Image (cartoon, rainbow, N blue to C red):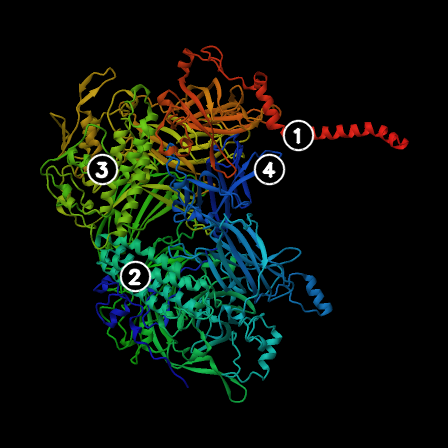
């Protein structure tokens, strides 16, 4: 009989899973897992970490999250803006851009004859698919030339990337990036052009910060803004991707066709019924191997070739084995290869490579049915529930040299044969042994509790009951053990020839004997194993690639330890315990030593057989990475200080991500282990355990984290069955022991089990015993009592329609379970209940159980009166164990209450506050246990309360409640709410508001403040939640629940007496705040230290980048020296655009500063720069006041400030002096904390939380809002608070709050513009208009809809009179106008005006930057700054304002200096205090005690949402709201923000001459090269109005003389630098569409032909806002003027008005390079419409102001004028050979003629013989 362990415990054991800093070796403390603290209070034990405690190392931690998240469909929206294209290759083309995602295609409009079309078109694609499917979709942009209805056009080039790449970008988007086009049919061709676009991918619930749509004035640096993720080189090359597919094995039986079965029945033919082929999808292309007919072990030996750019922008390759079938092909298994995991882009990186290696495929269960319900799993969606097959593949990538001539230039997918590879390439076959023991099976779902249950364990196909194998046959022994047929294996088992094996023929036992479960409680059953624990064991044969798994295990363990440490640090920070930095240093030290250990371990076997290139390269790169990480951890450790903990924590989290990424092994070896629960031969639920987790190694770090340990495993339902509620319930909870290792190493396989058992072996034959036991019998057992102290839960999930739950908790431990009482209608139950579990029997040695007890499962349910309880969530805990010989006392006992997170699926569903202790019952029985105080309060019956010492220490608190009002209450059961009341409850005590008598008339409460006293725990973290419930009082004393809200944390409402010593309370001494008279440098965090303007502001050291930028700006010529703007030209829009520019500059500066700070942080070693002393000074007087929290700010922020200041300063110096407003790129509420400075809005919820996605439907559950506030403080209060002047005891802590009677208000809503609206019409556009709703008033601006626009400028203001509180929710919607049918809502935004109105931040009317009484910046508040300041001082009980001589104003102890003169519209100056008052208001937050930041004049950007598409933004709306109480003076007229009307201009272009135009034609008579030149011109977007000069015929030198005038009238928006044109899109359009197009002039030179099409020779495009100055002479004009446009000084025709010079014409030659094709001398003159009317000019050379006729040399009749020259040319050059041939021919003819002529005579002579 064998007892206990065989492996002696290792020395390093006891320290294995502990924190790095063990200050003391006290065992008691060790069990309580030190958090780096020094007394039991500092030890954090929250559920995340509670379960991870691992002391005796016999148990491993369970996973808390249950539900599979993969495979569930999600809503996605992909929005793409195609802005423009540049440098398209081809001559004079008509390009269209096609955007295609998967099978959806959308096209832009066609632009005529241009190589740089401007589109600015917006497309939206919507999907509802699982994330994996979405991120593998390919987005393809293609440019097509001259596509129309009849022809598909020719492809210019394409660009593709997968959606996953976009989603992994910051903010999930690429903004204003250039996509580089290439030709898929000719990879040698190079770049085919660029398309500028924005691409964003939004999943439901993401909110995207859209970069502000500023003016597109940024330099078009294409190379610097390519559409590529960070780290991808801009020069991508073409590469070949070879995917070699050798063979597969272990395929399941797919008897797909019924015919095959018939055939088998009749003929007895038994063929393998599967015809597999492999399909590879990559970068939107698909390649297939040949089909291998009827084979379970197909051999292909083929390679599939893809040609794609490298690095590819498509991350995953999808490899599928499919079964070919005439009807439909189905997937047998799918495997994804992530290219990032099989390559490394570092300096010492490597190209993607893999194998030859086996990849394992998982999917649905192997028993084939005709309709497989889990077919999705075989397609790779969701977690596979069974092994399907394995496939031997390898991947090689080679970069192509596109210059070489041999390469194939197409990107078609090719398939080629390759030779077979040897069996041993993938490693040596080894025999593996898997052992498992089932120690406990509890929590078996009651639905399956009536039939016997057994468990099946499989690894690969070994152990599988249906078509599994037990052992490879003899002739295959050398090969891999694939699928022998069942009959075959049966025979083998009984044959005697291989009986001679080492331990007898070991027959695998892969299932436990069936056993009938017994009842635990109403919901669950358990299997009565008691002391008999069934075992399984399986032998299997695999290639020995353990090294891969070992390395992954070491990294996994380092990562686990790191994660655990980080959780600890976060917990310490969260619970505000001492010294988080010490714990973080410990974590870093641990990380460093772990990394070093990896390097030494991984180094030792570099030359194992079967190592692939990827193995070697990965090993090298992992070692490099970890060495590097170790060094970084060391330096970071020295930088961890108290004030940098949070920053460093983020940094260390990056380490964790990197480790997790490195640990994932792309090349599989041993397949995963599956455990199935079988009931009545049906597969019910499963668990999948990665084989690496249970793999054994002699080296401790290398073995799997669960190898030889008891693991708690929860079985779940397969595939889609596991989605939603079904996935949350536990099918069974297993305590499982697993061990996997080489058969020859198996002597230790039992050593990890809890000690004290005997083995029972199977009897085999006479007296022969097999080696592993088939079951274990425990002879050692201990008896315990478990005490569960259930104190309370909070923020539970609402499970009833009332929006509340009736929660109770069920606690499971081993085979026992108990329930707490049910508490009705609450989400924050305080059970305060002790559950005692008596006579708990646990098996094993006492000491092991002490250090490592089993886990407790706590499930929270909602009790429904009829029917069964509904599941709310679950959490795990470990009890603290006390042995009978230990003393019950500190430090471990009594245990502390801890928070445990409750999970429902993957979502957090609340927290549980509880404590657990497990007490051993010794020989003396229960008498030795600490006594339990019996139930003291009889009304609770036999329920025991949580004993003293464990329950929290309470003290008396007073809770004051401010009742303000109720808003937006929805109907209850179809009846309207009429007489609501609010009940507040906290810790059993509470208070009720007054009843609102008529909700419709006045929804505010009559009594404002009430209070109640309550006993709350001293420890703020343990404070119970406060419940707010609203009920409607009906007749006969009935009342109905309207809705409820639970305030989870009272912390923000706790009143803390002000610290009188703090700096900002010091009232002695004056602090001078000096301001420059110019607009202040604003928007620095809190208060910029404006000591005096001399130093602080002027001598800002401009960072290097800025200097460069300055230079750049200087280079750009005259842009900076701008004249002072003419006041009359300025309007509100000038202010708006100036502000947007400032905002984008600021954002850029912030980004740059952040990036720089990060770089600096990486570089700075040790503690330099982290603690800055200079601005900690407490000097009174001139030092700017510092809020105490700003002290010691890190250099990061300082730098940011400096940079911003510098930037803004420079901007201010260069820019016109325009007053600005503040443009917020978010909602004002976000900026200002929802305006809850004293009035809070609590959402009231009713109804169940939906089950699809628990976090989304919150919006729909809101049934109204309660407005009020809370104040919690310990009683009695300090004396001095009540003694303040004017303290009104009725209002308690809520002093100085306004009256809540109804008030009439004029609400003025300004709607500026909308951006990126969701298209609502088929044409991909929308016709938006604004609808404004407040109370019963609704304003529809339908007649002013804007046609076919997704970025409409509304520029409207609307006035509405409203009465607060009845009408306080403003809804601004954007609708889409439709000619037929009802208009569709695009999106809406809601603004709570009441909170803004009453906020101390004065959000009624923004404070302008300067005070003026005329012009575009007129003060628009009816109250002047002095009045506002006086009012604020009075309300805040602040001394002041005192205006003094010399421009001084004193408020409290702050003195502000500023200008005192004001200019009226006539230019007269008069004295005023308004400027001073305004400066004080702008710095109101500096005023002690009463100060807060006042809202500046602003425009806010609000997201538009559509209730039908929750969570996905439908565009943005820029707007602002002013509010004026009607009892105050009336405000002036609304600011005019109507859109700027474009100004009419006329551009006159005189084409004087051309020169050096290339010559196309050959002259017929003189043979000289010549061209018939004419010039064509048009303004971009107006191709149909193109104008041509006359033709200069027969130019021999490329010189042309024209003197021809083009006239282009156009409408232009100066501020946006765009030409505005309106035209109908097509003949069917209802109305005209407005387009905004950059102002660009295109000039082209052509060669005229009489009979064929004219030839295009070249073109030049001038951006009228910035184009290079023309050259003085033709000689100085070069192609550089076009190629290096960026470097040259530019001019703007709008400033110069008139410019003349030479510009080059360019075109692309055969090699797609730009070449000079001519030069043009032109004169550009810009006139306004008025000027043009005064001095008209004629088109061409017509009157008025005719141009003289050009003096053209008459070369066309040259042959007439110099005939000799022509003749000489004709004879000597052109027709030389022809003439010679003709002369020869004539001579021959003459001779022939003479011959014929003289022949007769001659013959006669001869005949007659004369």
Q: Earlier in the sequence, mark 1 or mark 3?
A: 3
Q: Secondary structure at mark 1?
A: helix
Local crowd size for mark 2, using a 10 Å CA cut-off: few (<14), some (14–19), many (≥20):
many
The quadrant in which residue 894 appears is: bottom left
Q: Can you identify the residue that label 2 sits on?
A: 630
Q: Nearer the viewer, mark 4 or mark 1?
A: 1
Q: Where residue 152 is drawn, which disc sits there?
A: 4
Q: Is residue 1394 visible?
A: no
Find out whether the residues at labels 4 and 3 contact each other: C-beta distance under 8 Å. no
How many angstroms separate mark 4 from mark 2 (CA)? 58 Å
How many angstroms separate mark 4 from mark 1 (CA)? 52 Å
* Location of residue 191 with respect to 1784 vertically, above or below: below
Local crowd size for mark 3, using a 10 Å CA cut-off: few (<14), some (14–19), many (≥20):
some
Q: Can you identify the residue that label 3 sits on?
A: 1492
Find out whether the residues at labels 4 and 2 contact each other: C-beta distance under 8 Å. no
Image coords of residue 813 (percent x, y) = 38, 69
Image coords of residue 73 (percent x, y) = 49, 50
Q: Earlier in the sequence, mark 4 or mark 3?
A: 4
């Amino acid at each position: 009989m064998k007892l206990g362990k065989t492996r002696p415990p290792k020395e390093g054991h006891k320290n294995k899973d502990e924190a790095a800093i063990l200050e003391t070796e006290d065992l008691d403390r060790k069990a309580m897992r030190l958090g780096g603290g020094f007394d039991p209070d500092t030890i954090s034990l929250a559920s995340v970490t509670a379960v991870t405690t691992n002391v005796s190392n016999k148990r491993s931690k369970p996973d808390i999250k249950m539900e599979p998240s993969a495979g569930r469909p999600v809503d996605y929206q992909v929005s793409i803006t195609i802005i423009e294209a540049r440098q398209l290759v081809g001559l004079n083309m008509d390009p269209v851009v096609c955007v295609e995602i998967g099978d959806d295609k959308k096209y832009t409009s066609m632009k005529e004859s241009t190589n740089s079309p401007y589109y600015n078109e917006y497309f939206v694609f919507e999907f509802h698919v699982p994330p994996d499917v979405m991120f593998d979709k390919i987005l393809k942009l293609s440019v097509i030339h001259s596509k129309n209805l009849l022809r598909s056009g020719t492809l210019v080039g394409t660009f593709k990337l997968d959606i996953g790449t976009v989603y992994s970008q910051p903010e999930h988007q690429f903004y204003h990036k250039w996509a580089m086009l290439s030709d898929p049919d000719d990879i040698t061709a190079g770049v085919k052009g660029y398309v500028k676009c924005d691409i964003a991918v939004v999943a439901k619930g993401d909110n995207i910060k859209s970069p502000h749509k500023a003016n597109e004035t940024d330099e078009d640096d294409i190379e610097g803004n390519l559409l590529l993720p960070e780290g991808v080189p801009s020069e991508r090359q073409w590469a070949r991707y070879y995917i070699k597919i050798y063979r597969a094995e272990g395929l399941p039986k797919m008897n797909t066709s019924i015919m095959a079965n018939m055939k088998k029945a009749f003929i007895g033919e038994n063929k393998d019924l599967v015809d597999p082929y492999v399909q590879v999808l990559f970068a939107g292309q698909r390649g297939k191997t040949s089909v291998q007919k009827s084979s379970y072990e197909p051999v292909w030996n083929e390679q599939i070739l893809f040609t794609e750019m490298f690095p590819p922008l498509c991350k995953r390759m999808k490899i599928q084995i499919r079964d070919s079938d005439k009807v439909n092909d189905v997937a047998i298994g799918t495997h994804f290869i992530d290219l990032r995991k099989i390559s490394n882009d570092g300096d010492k990186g490597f190209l993607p490579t893999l194998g030859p290696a086996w990849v394992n495929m998982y999917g649905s269960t192997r028993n084939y049915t005709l309709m497989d319900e889990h077919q999705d799993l075989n397609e790779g969606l969701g977690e596979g529930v069974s092994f399907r097959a394995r496939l031997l593949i390898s991947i090689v990538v080679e970069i192509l040299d596109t210059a070489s001539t041999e390469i194939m230039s197409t990107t078609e997918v090719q398939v080629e044969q390759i030779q077979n590879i040897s069996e041993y390439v993938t490693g040596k076959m080894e025999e593996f042994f898997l052992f498992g023991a089932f120690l406990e099976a509890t929590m078996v779902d009651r639905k399956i509790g009536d039939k016997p249950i057994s468990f099946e364990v499989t690894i690969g196909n070994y152990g599988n009951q249906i078509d599994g194998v037990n052992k490879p046959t003899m002739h295959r022994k050398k090969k891999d053990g694939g699928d022998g047929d069942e009959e075959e294996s049966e025979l083998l088992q009984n044959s005697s020839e291989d009986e001679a094996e080492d331990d007898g023929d070991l027959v695998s036992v892969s299932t436990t004997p069936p056993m009938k479960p017994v009842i635990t409680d109403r919901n669950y059953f358990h299997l009565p194993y008691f002391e008999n624990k069934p075992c399984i064991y399986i032998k299997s044969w695999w290639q020995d690639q353990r090294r891969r798994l070992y390395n992954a295990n070491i990294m996994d363990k380092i990562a686990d330890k790191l994660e655990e440490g980080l959780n600890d640090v976060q917990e310490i920070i969260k619970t505000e315990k001492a010294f988080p930095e010490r714990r973080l240093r410990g974590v870093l030290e641990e990380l460093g030593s772990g990394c070093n250990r990896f390097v030494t371990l991984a180094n030792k076997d570099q030359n194992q057989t079967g190592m692939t290139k990827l193995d070697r390269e990965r090993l090298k790169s992992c070692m490099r990475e970890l060495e590097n990480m170790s060094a970084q951890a060391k330096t970071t450790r020295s930088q961890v200080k108290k004030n940098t903990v949070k920053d460093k924590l983020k940094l260390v989290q990056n380490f964790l991500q990197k480790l997790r990424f490195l640990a994932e092994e792309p090349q599989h070896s041993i397949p995963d282990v599956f455990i199935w629960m079988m009931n009545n031969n049906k597969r019910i639920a499963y668990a999948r355990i990665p084989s690496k987790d249970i793999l054994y190694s002699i080296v401790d770090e290398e073995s799997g984290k669960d190898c030889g340990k008891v693991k708690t495993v929860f079985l779940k339902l397969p595939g889609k069955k596991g989605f939603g509620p079904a996935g949350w319930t536990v099918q069974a909870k297993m305590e499982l022991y697993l061990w996997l290792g080489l058969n020859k190493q198996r002597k230790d396989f039992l050593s990890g089990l809890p000690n004290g058992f005997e083995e029972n072996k199977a009897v085999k034959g006479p007296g022969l015993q097999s080696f592993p036991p088939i079951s274990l019998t425990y002879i050692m057992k201990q008896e315990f009592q478990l005490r569960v102290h259930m104190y309370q839960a909070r923020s539970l999930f609402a499970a009833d329609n009332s929006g509340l739950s009736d929660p109770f908790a069920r606690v499971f431990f081993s085979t026992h379970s108990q329930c707490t009482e049910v508490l009705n209608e609450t989400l924050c139950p305080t059970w305060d209940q002790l559950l005692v579990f008596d006579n708990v029997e646990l098996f094993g040695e006492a000491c092991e159980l002490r250090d490592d007890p089993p886990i407790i499962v706590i499930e929270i349910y909602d009790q429904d009166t009829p029917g069964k309880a509904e599941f709310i969530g679950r959490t795990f805990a470990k009890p603290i164990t006390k042995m009978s010989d230990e003393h019950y006392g500190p430090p471990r006992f009594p245990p502390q209450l801890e928070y445990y997170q409750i999970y429902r699926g993957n979502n957090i569903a609340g927290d549980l506050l509880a404590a657990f202790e497990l007490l051993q019952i010794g020989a003396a029985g229960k008498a030795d246990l600490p006594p339990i105080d019996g139930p003291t309060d009889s009304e609770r019956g036999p329920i025991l309360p949580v004993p003293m010492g464990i329950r929290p220490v309470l003290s008396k608190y007073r809770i004051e409640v401010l009742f303000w009002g109720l808003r937006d209450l929805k109907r209850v059961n179809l009846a309207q709410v009429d007489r609501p009341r609010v009940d507040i409850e906290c810790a059993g005590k509470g208070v009720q508001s007054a009843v609102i008598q008529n909700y419709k008339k006045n929804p505010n409460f009559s009594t404002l403040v009430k209070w109640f006293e309550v006993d709350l725990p001293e420890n703020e973290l343990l404070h119970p939640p406060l419940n707010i419930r609203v009920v409607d009082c009906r007749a006969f004393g009935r009342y109905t629940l309207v809705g409820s809200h639970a305030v989870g944390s009272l912390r923000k409402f706790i009143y803390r007496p002000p610290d009188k010593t703090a700096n900002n309370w010091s009232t002695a001494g004056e602090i001078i705040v000096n301001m420059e008279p110019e607009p202040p440098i604003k928007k620095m965090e809190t208060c910029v230290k404006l000591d005096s303007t001399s130093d602080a502001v002027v001598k800002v050291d401009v960072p290097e980048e800025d200097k460069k930028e300055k230079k750049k700006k200087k280079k750009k010529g005259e842009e900076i020296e701008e004249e002072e703007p003419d006041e009359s030209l300025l309007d509100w829009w000038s202010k708006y655009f100036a502000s947007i520019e400032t905002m984008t500059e600021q954002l850029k500066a912030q980004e740059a500063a952040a990036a720089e700070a990060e770089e600096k942080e990486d570089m700075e070693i040790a503690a330099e720069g982290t603690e800055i002393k200079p601005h900690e000074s407490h000097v009174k007087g001139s030092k700017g006041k510092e809020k105490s929290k700003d002290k010691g700010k890190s250099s990061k922020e300082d730098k940011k400030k400096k940079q911003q200041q510098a930037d803004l300063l420079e901007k201010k110096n260069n820019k016109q002096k325009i007053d600005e407003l503040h443009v917020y790129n978010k909602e004002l509420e976000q900026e200002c904390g929802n305006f809850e400075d004293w009035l809070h809005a609590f959402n009231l919820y009713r109804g169940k939380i939906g089950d699809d996605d628990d976090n989304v439907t919150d919006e729909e559950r809101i049934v109204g809002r309660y407005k009020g506030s809370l104040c919690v403080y310990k009683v009695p209060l300090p004396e001095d608070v009540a003694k303040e002047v004017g303290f009104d005891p009725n209002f308690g802590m809520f002093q100085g709050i306004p009256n809540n009677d109804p008030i009439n208000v004029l609400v003025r809503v300004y709607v500026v513009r909308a951006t990126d609206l969701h298209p609502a019409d088929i044409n991909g556009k929308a016709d938006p208009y604004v609808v404004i709703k407040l109370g019963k008033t609704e304003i529809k601006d339908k007649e002013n809809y804007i046609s076919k626009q997704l970025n409409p400028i509304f520029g409207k203001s609307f006035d509405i009179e409203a009465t607060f509180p009845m009408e306080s929710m403003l809804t601004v919607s954007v609708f889409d106008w439709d000619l037929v049918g009802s208009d569709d809502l695009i999106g809406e935004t809601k603004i709570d005006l009441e909170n803004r109105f009453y906020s101390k931040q004065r959000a009624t009317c923004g404070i302008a930057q300067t005070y003026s009484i005329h012009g575009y910046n007129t003060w628009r508040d009816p109250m002047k700054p002095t009045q506002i300041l006086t009012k604020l001082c009075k309300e805040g009980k602040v001394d002041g304002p005192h205006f003094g001589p010399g421009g001084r104003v004193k408020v409290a102890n702050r003195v502000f200096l500023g200008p005192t003169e004001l200019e009226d519209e006539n230019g007269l100056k008069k004295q005023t205090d308004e400027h001073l008052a305004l400066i004080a208001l702008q710095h109101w937050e500096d005023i002690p005690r009463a100060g807060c930041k006042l809202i500046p004049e602003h425009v806010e950007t609000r997201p538009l949402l559509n209730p039908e598409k929750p969570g996905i933004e439908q565009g943005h709306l820029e707007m602002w709201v002013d509010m004026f109480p009607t009892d105050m003076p009336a405000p002036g007229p609304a600011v005019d923000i109507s859109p700027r009307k474009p100004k009419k201009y006329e551009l006159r272009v005189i084409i004087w001459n051309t020169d050096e135009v290339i010559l196309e034609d050959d002259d017929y008579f003189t043979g000289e090269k010549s061209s018939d030149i004419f010039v064509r011109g048009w303004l971009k977007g107006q191709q149909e109005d193109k104008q041509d000069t006359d033709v200069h015929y027969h130019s021999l030198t490329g010189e042309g003389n024209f003197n021809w005038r083009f006239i282009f009238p156009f409408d232009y928006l100066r501020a946006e630098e765009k030409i505005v044109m309106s035209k109908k899109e097509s003949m069917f359009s209802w109305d005209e569409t407005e387009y905004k197009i950059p102002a660009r002039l295109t000039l082209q030179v052509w060669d005229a032909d009489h009979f064929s099409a004219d030839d295009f020779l070249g073109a030049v495009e001038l951006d009228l806002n910035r184009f290079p100055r023309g050259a003085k002479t033709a000689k100085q004009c070069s192609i550089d003027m076009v190629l290096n446009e960026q470097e040259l000084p530019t001019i703007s025709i709008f400033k110069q008005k008139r410019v003349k010079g030479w510009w080059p014409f360019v075109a692309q030659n055969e090699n797609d390079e730009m070449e000079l094709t001519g030069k043009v001398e032109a004169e550009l003159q810009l006139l306004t419409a008025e000027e043009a009317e005064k001095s008209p000019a004629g088109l061409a050379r017509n009157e008025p102001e005719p141009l003289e006729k050009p003096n053209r040399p008459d070369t066309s009749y040259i042959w007439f004028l110099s005939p000799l020259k022509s003749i000489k040319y004709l004879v000597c050059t052109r027709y030389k050979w022809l003439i010679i041939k003709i002369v020869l021919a004539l001579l021959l003819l003459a001779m022939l003629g003479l011959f014929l002529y003289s022949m007769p005579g001659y013959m006669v002579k001869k005949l007659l013989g004369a």
